[in-house]
Amino acid sequence: DEYGFYANVNPHVDHPRWSQATERFVGSGGILDVQRQPTLLFNGYADQVASLYRGLDLRENF
């Protein structure tokens, strides 16, 4: 119940226990090359899937 349906696609709405504004990126150096980067809306697939969420309030329907 604490992790809403849109939680995984909206970096502007934080999970109750952590921020979703950034994510860990594992680079070519494997687990020793972990960096933080901004989380992209719809996990970076906005061009492909944004139409599926048209008309929905991604904060309200969190």
Image (cartoon, helix red, strand yellow):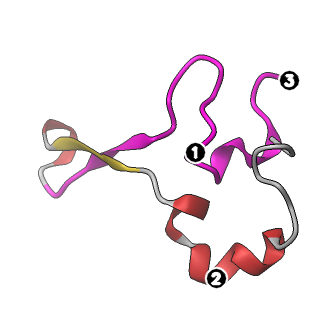
Is residue 62 shown left or right of residue 27? right
The amino acid type found where label 2 is placed reads Gln
Task: Name, please, the residue furthest toward the top.
Answer: 17
Mark 1: which secondary structure? loop
Residues shaded magenta: 1-28
Q: Which residue is mark 3?
A: 1
The quadrant in which the C terminus is found is top right
Residue type for callout 3: Asp
Residue shown at 55% from the left, 47% from the top? 11
Residue 50 horizontal side relative to residue 61, left or right:
left
Quadrant in the picture for residue 57: bottom right
User: What amino acid type is highlighted by mark number 1?
Assistant: His
Please name the predominant secondary structure of the magenta segment in the image. loop
The residue depicted at 87 percent of the width and 69 percent of the height is: 55
Residue 48: % across, % down: 64, 82
Vertically, is 50 above or below 43? Answer: below
Q: CA distance from mark 3 to mark 1?
A: 19 Å
Cα separation between marks 1 and 2: 19 Å
Which numbered disc covers residue 48?
2
Magenta run includes residue 16: yes
Residue wearing tag 1 = 12
